[in-house]
Image (cartoon, rainbow, N blue to C red):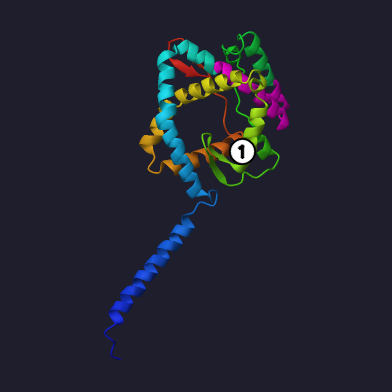
C-alpha cells in the first residue's frame, strides 16, 4: 500500500505526543506521596530561605561575634534545661517511666546545682539529654503524621507536627511569664542561639545538596522516624584516656 505524503509528519507528531505522555506519566509517578503540597511547600521554603539569608544569618553571625564561648554555652544549656520540662512530661505521656524519672532528675540537678541550667552538671553524672516532644507522643498514641508541611518561619514539619508544636509551646514555662516582652526577648535569644549553632550545618547542606528542598524534607522525615522509634542514643561525653587521647564512653 502506498503511503500518503502526510504519513512521516503524522509519525513524528505521534512520536512527540507519546514522548510527552511518557514524560508526564513519569512526573506524576515521581511525586512524593508524603508531600502532596510540594508546590506550596517549595514556595514557603523559598521565603524562609530568603528570611534566613537576609535576617537570621546576619543576626546569628553577630550573636557569635559578641558572645564569648563560655556565655554561648551557658545560654544553650539554659534553654536546653527549660526544654527538659517538656522532655520528661512527654516521657511519661509515652509510658516511659524510667526515662521520665531520669529526665526529671536531670532537670532538677541542672536547675539547682547547675545554677538555673547554665551548667550541664547532669551530663557529668551520666544523665544525658533525651529528645522527646509532643509530636513524638502523638505518634506513639497512633496519630498519623499527615502530609509534609513547611511552615512560615518555623520550617519543615507535618500536620501532626503543627499540633505537637502547640503542645511544646504550652509546656514552656517562659511563655507564661509576665510582662509579655520577657518571653519575646528570651525567645529571640533562643532563636539566635539555635541559628548560630546551626551555621556549619547549613553550609554542609548548601554544598552537598543538588535539590536543597528535597534534601531538607527527606532529612526531616527520616529524623522524625528515628526519634519516634527511639533509634538514637543520647550524646555521650568525651573522656580522656591515660595517654591523653579522646575516647567515647
In the rendered structure, which segment of residues is drawn in magenta?
Answer: 77-101
- For label 1, the crowd category at 10 Å Cα-Cα, with few meaning under 14, some 14 to 19 and many 20 or more, is some
> 150 and 228: which one is in front?
150
Q: Is residue 98 left or right of residue 17?
A: right
- Picture residue at 43% right of the left edge, 36% below the top: 49
- Picture residue at 62% right of the left edge, 43% below the top: 145
**What is the chief secondary structure element of the magenta stretch?**
helix
In this view, which residue lies farthest toward the bottom? 1
> 107 and 45: which one is in front?
45
Residue 211 part of the magenta-drawn span: no
Secondary structure under tag 1 reads helix
Residue 108 picture location, percent across and down: 67, 14
Residue 192 picture location, percent across and down: 48, 23
Residue 167: in sight, yes or no?
yes
Q: Is residue 45 left or right of residue 1?
A: right
Residue 234 picture location, percent across and down: 57, 25
Residue 97 part of the magenta-drawn span: yes
Where is 242 relative to 196, above or below?
above
- Picture residue at 44% right of the left edge, 40% below the top: 46
In which image quadrant can residue 83 be found? top right
Number of numbered tags placed on the structure image? 1
Q: Quadrant of the N terminus?
A: bottom left
> 176 and 237: which one is in front?
176
The residue identified by callout 1 is 162
In this view, which residue lies farthest toward the left? 5
Where is 142 relative to 100, above or below?
below
Residue 232 picture location, percent across and down: 57, 31
Residue 128: in sight, yes or no?
no
Amino acid at each position: 500500500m502506498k503511503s500518503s505524503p502526510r504519513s512521516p509528519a503524522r509519525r513524528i507528531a505521534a512520536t512527540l505526543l507519546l514522548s510527552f505522555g511518557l514524560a508526564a506519566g513519569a512526573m506524576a509517578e515521581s511525586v512524593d506521596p508524603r508531600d502532596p503540597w510540594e508546590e506550596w511547600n517549595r514556595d514557603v521554603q523559598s521565603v524562609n530561605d530568603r528570611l534566613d539569608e537576609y535576617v537570621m544569618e546576619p543576626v546569628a553571625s553577630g550573636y557569635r561575634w559578641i558572645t564569648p564561648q563560655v556565655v554561648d554555652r551557658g545560654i544553650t544549656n539554659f534553654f536546653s534545661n527549660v526544654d527538659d520540662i517538656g522532655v520528661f512530661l512527654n516521657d511519661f505521656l509515652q509510658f516511659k517511666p524510667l526515662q521520665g524519672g531520669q529526665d526529671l532528675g536531670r532537670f532538677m540537678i541542672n536547675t539547682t546545682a547547675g545554677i538555673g541550667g547554665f551548667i550541664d552538671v547532669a551530663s557529668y553524672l551520666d544523665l544525658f539529654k533525651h529528645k522527646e516532644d509532643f509530636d513524638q507522643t502523638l505518634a506513639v498514641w497512633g496519630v498519623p503524621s499527615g502530609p509534609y508541611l513547611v511552615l512560615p518561619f518555623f520550617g519543615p514539619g507535618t500536620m501532626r507536627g503543627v499540633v505537637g508544636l502547640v503542645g511544646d509551646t504550652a509546656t514552656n514555662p517562659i511563655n507564661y511569664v509576665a510582662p509579655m516582652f520577657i518571653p519575646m526577648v528570651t525567645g529571640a535569644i533562643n532563636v539566635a542561639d539555635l541559628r548560630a549553632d546551626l551555621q556549619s550545618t547549613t553550609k554542609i547542606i548548601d554544598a552537598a545538596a543538588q535539590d536543597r528542598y528535597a534534601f531538607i524534607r527527606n532529612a526531616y522525615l527520616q529524623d522524625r522516624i528515628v526519634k519516634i522509634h527511639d533509634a538514637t542514643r543520647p550524646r555521650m561525653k568525651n573522656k580522656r584516656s591515660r595517654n591523653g587521647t579522646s575516647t567515647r564512653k
